[in-house]
Amino acid sequence: MKLIKSLTVSLTLILAGFVHADEFDKDDLDRWTQQFNDVAAEGRRLWTSPELGSNGVTCAQCHPNSANTHMETYPKFQKQIGRVSMMWEMINWCIRNPLEGMPLDADDPEMIAIHAYLAKERSGVAIAPGKH
């Protein structure tokens, strides 16, 4: 009986931690929205800047306002890479090839900023992984 009570108390405490994690208020939402917008703005700055490459080319020259990136379709087969790929891999393909730059890690703050920018630009478009 003590074991059952102990397990019940432990489970209750564990579940209480999960419930608490989902609680947030308007101030939280405002703060999170502002952080997203700040990161997306940095992504747009990178998108329009030649600093990702070595030859003066920018992402925006081929994809103004993220045109023809279709972030919502990833993961998908990407011909340039030759397999099903994630969006960050295609971004790196572009950085290495047209921009002649150094690829970014998937979790690099600059890659996250670029993703945030692309997501913001494509906001409202239905997610369609694998679509061409």
Image: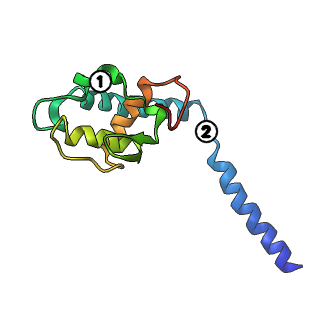
Amino acid under label 2? Phe
Using the rendered image of the protein, determine whether residue 1 is visible from the camera's viewpoint: yes
Q: Position of residue 76 (x, y in %)?
A: 45, 40
Secondary element at tag 1: loop
Left or right, residue 22 beside residue 75? right
Asked if one can make out residue 110 in the rendered structure from this viewpoint, the answer is no
Instruction: Give the left or right position of residue 95, taking residue 70 as reference.
Output: left
Q: Callout 1: few (<14), some (14-19), or many (20+) C-alpha neighbours within 10 Å?
A: few
- Return the residue nearer the eye: 102 or 9: 102
Give me the residue at 61% from left, 34% from top.
Answer: 25
Residue on which disc 1 sits = 63
Q: Is 20 above or below relative to 42?
A: below
Percent across and percent down for residue 106 are 35, 49
Residue positioned 15% across, 40% down in the render: 100
- Residue type at mark 1: give it: His
Q: Describe residue 49's horizontal placement relative to residue 89 as left or right.
A: left
Q: Which mark is residue 129?
A: none
Q: Earlier in the sequence, mark 1 or mark 2?
A: 2
Q: Residue at x 27, y 42 (%)?
A: 93
Per the rendering, the mark at residue 24 is 2
> Depth check: 119 or 9 in front?
119
Helix, strand or loop status at disc 2:
loop
Judged by depth in the image, the label closer to the viewer, 1 or 2, is 1
